[in-house]
Image (cartoon, rainbow, N blue to C red):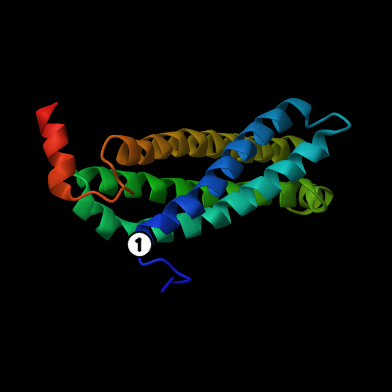
């Protein structure tokens, strides 16, 4: 009898991981383009593209991480080097944390540079230069976090590719067959 949910839980992870990867990489590109076009007429379009891609990608990272945790115990019984899954999971967690940190800093920057800008300049910071320095610091933090997410995400994806293409994760093979082929090479 066919089941609605397959018994191989490790197959859910690839279904959930590819959209967050694509959305976060598109978000990195949109944020870098926003840096170039922020003060022009269409700059706000890149801001919204970045925010939507980043928010959906960060939410998707949670699902990808949780399904990866479920798949880890199954995959570790199939592959020869289970330390690779631990390294992949560690970098996935770094990606998750950094993406949410970048989202927080980005929203904080939008909040400060929006409606509250004039009020903050008058009430908290008496000079315009102090506010400008704070905004530059927040912008720098945002850009560093976004670029860091892009770099860590690429490395996490590389490790996931190694799991699939060199270790045979996700294939129906017994550990003896996989490891015997690796040992003979």
According to the image, label 1 marks what residue? 8
Q: Residue furthest front?
A: 1
Image-based side of 15 in relation to 126, left or right: left
Q: Which residue does the image show at 79% across and 53% down from the upper left?
A: 116
Residue situated in front as seen by the camera: 5 or 128: 5
Task: Tell me if I can see residue 126 in this picture.
Answer: no
Task: Tell me if I can see residue 75 in this picture.
Answer: yes
Q: Position of residue 141 (x, y in %)?
A: 56, 38
Q: Secondary structure at mark 1?
A: loop
Residue situated in front as seen by the camera: 118 or 111: 111
Q: Which residue does the image show at 53% across and 39% down from the upper left?
A: 145
Q: Which residue does the image show at 58% across and 37% down from the upper left?
A: 25
Image-based side of 173 in relation to 144, left or right: left
Q: Which residue does the image show at 48% across and 50% down from the upper left?
A: 17
The answer to whether 69 is drawn above or below residue 105 in the figure is below
> In the rendered view of the protein, which quadrant contains the N terminus?
bottom left
Image-based side of 31 in relation to 93, left or right: right
| Image quadrant where residue 166 sits | top left
> In the rendered view of the protein, which quadrant contains the C terminus?
top left
The answer to whether 5 is drawn above or below residue 173 in the figure is below
Q: Residue furthest right?
A: 41
Q: Position of residue 10 (x, y in %)?
A: 36, 57
Residue situated in front as seen by the camera: 185 or 20: 185
| Image quadrant where residue 23 sits | top right
Q: Residues within 10 Å of mark 1 (few under 14, many from 20)?
A: few
Tally of numbered tags: 1
Q: Position of residue 11 (x, y in %)?
A: 40, 56
Q: Position of residue 151 (x, y in %)?
A: 46, 33
Image-based side of 183 in relation to 168, left or right: left
């Amino acid at each position: 009898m066919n089941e609605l949910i397959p018994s191989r839980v490790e197959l859910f992870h690839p279904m959930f991981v590819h959209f967050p990867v694509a959305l976060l990489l598109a978000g990195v590109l949109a944020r870098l383009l926003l840096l170039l076009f922020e003060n022009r007429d269409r700059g706000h379009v890149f801001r919204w593209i970045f925010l939507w891609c980043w928010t959906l990608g960060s939410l998707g990272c949670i699902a990808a991480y949780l399904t990866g945790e479920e798949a880890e115990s199954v995959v570790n019984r199939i592959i020869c080097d289970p330390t690779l899954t631990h390294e992949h999971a560690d970098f996935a967690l770094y990606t998750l944390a950094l993406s949410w940190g970048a989202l927080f800093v980005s929203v904080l920057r939008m909040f400060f540079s929006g409606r509250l800008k004039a009020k903050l300049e008058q009430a908290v910071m008496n000079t315009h230069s102090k506010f400008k320095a704070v905004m530059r610091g927040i912008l720098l933090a945002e850009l560093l976090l976004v670029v860091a997410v892009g770099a860590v995400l690429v490395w996490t994806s590389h490790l996931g590719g190694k799991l699939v293409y060199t270790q045979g994760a996700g294939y129906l093979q017994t550990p003896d067959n996989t490891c015997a082929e690796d040992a003979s090479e």
